[in-house]
Image (cartoon, rainbow, N blue to C red):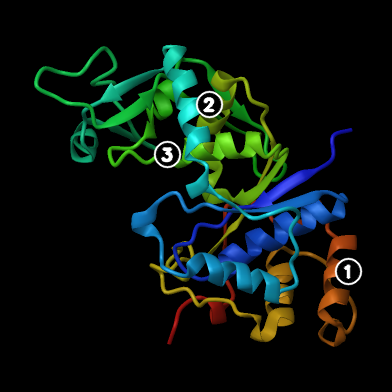
Amino acid sequence: MTRYRGRFAPSPTGPLHFGSLVAAVASYLDARHQQGEWLLRVEDLDPPREIAGASDSIIRTLEQFGMTWDGPISYQSQRHHLYDEALEQLRLQGNLYDCGCSRREIADSAVMTDAGPVYPGTCRNGLPPGRGPRSVRVRVDSSVIRVRDRLQAPLQQQLAADVGDFIVRRADLLVSYQMAVVVDDAEQQINHVVRGADLLDSTPRQMYLQQLLGLPTPAYLHLPIAVDSRQAKLSKQSLAQPVTGADSNGAIIDALRFLCQPLPDAVHDASRDELWQWAIDHWDVTALPASRTMAAPAEYIESS
């Protein structure tokens, strides 16, 4: 059997918060429980959203929590040649076209679905007169993409009706998240992806790109995301408290409770290494709550 190979892929848009810690802990335990590899990939693909020093802060925090990864850390900002090669392959296959539409124009004419606005195909057969190219889109067909998640209920999308032709290179010339994550996971031979359920609805787009590029599809597990009292995902914008190594055991315990995992007797007397070994040995996917959101502990929600 192929050895388990997973990853944690944070974006450096701020320090590690509880929601990101949950994803890190779950992906780490899922890999280690199966004697697998766990890689660390920094998704620094969007410079306008990045915070100076955030990458180093996230890495230091993971080290303070005693989480060890296999191999060197990879950075998306150093992998543009791989994305360019994949885009060229899609273009040669006739799967891409230039789009001259702005976000406002699409919002004005698009139908909204759970996956977002459906692109109406304005530029599918060529740019309208007087328009120059802005973004690059991939053509979708009428086939149905089915996601059989390890936790969440089965999901299916007909991309043509639910999403439309979607962007793979943005107007600012940056490659899209959908494109980058597909290329990265394949190149790094990732065969298990554990991440937040906020990314579940975009998974069919990734699977479609995998099909076009002839790449394997990993096994997916989408965790409930930690939300505040307004049902907003924890983030820098929602003023989520950063987690620190000052009380790493306490934060690990909180993450395990959030994930409904068993805890050892006298859990607060355990050392950090003992706590990790217990959690690895007793990791139970069947105990995970199959919901898309869950309330985060109050102390992690916002700064005072």
Q: Which kind of residue does numbered mark 3 sit on?
A: Ser
Give the residue drawn at x 74%, y 68%. 256
Residue linked to disc 1? 278
Lateral position of residue 113 relative to residue 277, left or right: left
Q: Quadrant of residue 8?
A: bottom right
Residue linked to disc 2? 209
Q: Which residue in the rendered view is the most extreme toward the left?
A: 130
Q: Quadrant of the image for the C terminus?
A: bottom left
Q: Is residue 259 something one can see in this rendering? A: yes
Q: Which kind of residue does numbered mark 1 sit on?
A: Trp
Query: Reading the chain from its start, which is encountered first: label 2 or label 1?
Result: 2
Q: CA distance from mark 2 to mark 1?
A: 38 Å
> Which of these two is toward me, 146 or 20?
20
> Is label 1 in a helix, a strand or a loop?
helix
Residue linked to disc 3? 176
Give the residue drawn at x 26%, y 12%. 125
